[in-house]
Amino acid sequence: MNVVDLAPEHEKLYFVCLEDWSAEMKDAGDHKERWYRRARELGQRVKLALDDEGRVGGMIQYLPIEHSPAEGADLNFVQCIWVHGYKQGRGDFRGQGMGPALLEAAEEDTRGQGKKGLAAWGLAIPVFMRASWFRGRGYRPADRLGLQVLLWKSFAADAVPPRWVRRKKKPQNVPGKVTVSAFLNGWCPAQNMVFERARRAAAELGERVLFQEYLTAEPEVFREWGISDALFIDGREVRTGPPPSYETIRGLIARRLRRLR
């Protein structure tokens, strides 16, 4: 196994999070590519894990915490660490040590940048990005929002723990309309799918549906709302992990339409 920096020949694979076999990725559009072109100028880093045959089986992406959903100083923030574990496409690469190797490579790189620590988010339930996995590798909880745990590993005695940016407000209804409010950062194809599916459904359901988009990769938009990725229908947040299907999103909007007078 070998851990390498993202190279141009692997960019298309990275933009779909190693799931080039998935037809669903077509719904994600080109948001991640456009986000990455901008984010790498801000310090975005991507590393890939290759097996002995040179096949990409895992990835990690991280950037300065100032450009993340968390607050902190002199830290990097892991947005995602992922080892492909499906039978489809590339196959199952779990159990080869790719996850720990990727995290260690990110830690080494972060130290080399002179940063004081590395932060990451994890879920308090045993699914993707488990908080317990990071705790087992020396990361300590620093903050929590619902199921999302903010963890970190300090590299310096004077490092300050990070904190989640709190939501400042939520979108309001527009009288006489079904208001669909979609917040998009761009880094995550799953959330990009939600945005594109909601936009398409809103357009197909006609003029009584108002689609509002908030592009939170713009710092001033994120600071105003304190929201990175989310979907609201008439002010009520829709659960987006895992991403709901187009039919589910369309059905939720249509149900609100039937209640309009």
Image (cartoon, helix red, strand yellow):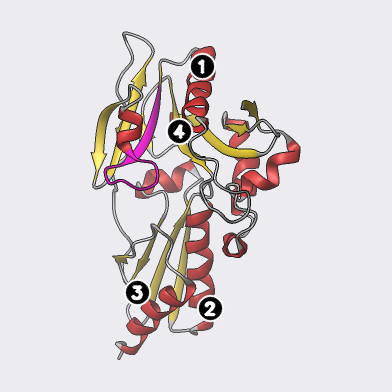
Task: Looking at the picture, tell me which residue is in the foreground, 180 or 145.
Answer: 145
Identity of the amino acid at label 2? Answer: Ala
Instruction: Label 1, secondary structure: give it.
Output: helix
Answer left or right for 222 relative to 42. left
Badge nearest the viewer, 3 or 1: 1
Q: Residues within 10 Å of mark 1 (few under 14, many from 20)?
A: few
Answer left or right for 119 relative to 91. left
Which labelled disc corresponds to residue 203?
A: 2
Identity of the amino acid at label 1? Answer: Glu
Instruction: Label 3, secondary structure: give it.
Output: loop
| For marks 3 and 1 on the same chain, the one whose residue lies earlier in the sequence | 1
Residue 176's place in the image compared with 18, above or below, is: below
**Could you tell me residue 141's position as x and y percent?**
26, 29
Q: Quadrant of the N terminus?
A: top right
Question: What's the distance in space between the residues labelled 2 and 3, CA to CA?
Answer: 17 Å
Residue at position x 59%, y 39% in the image = 57
What segment carries the magenta color?
118-130
Q: Report the residue marked by disc 3.
A: 174
Badge nearest the viewer, 4 or 2: 4
Q: Residues within 10 Å of mark 4 (few under 14, many from 20)?
A: many
Q: Residues within 10 Å of mark 3 (few under 14, many from 20)?
A: few
Q: Report the residue marked by disc 4.
A: 78
Identity of the amino acid at label 4? Answer: Val
Q: Report the residue marked by disc 1.
A: 108
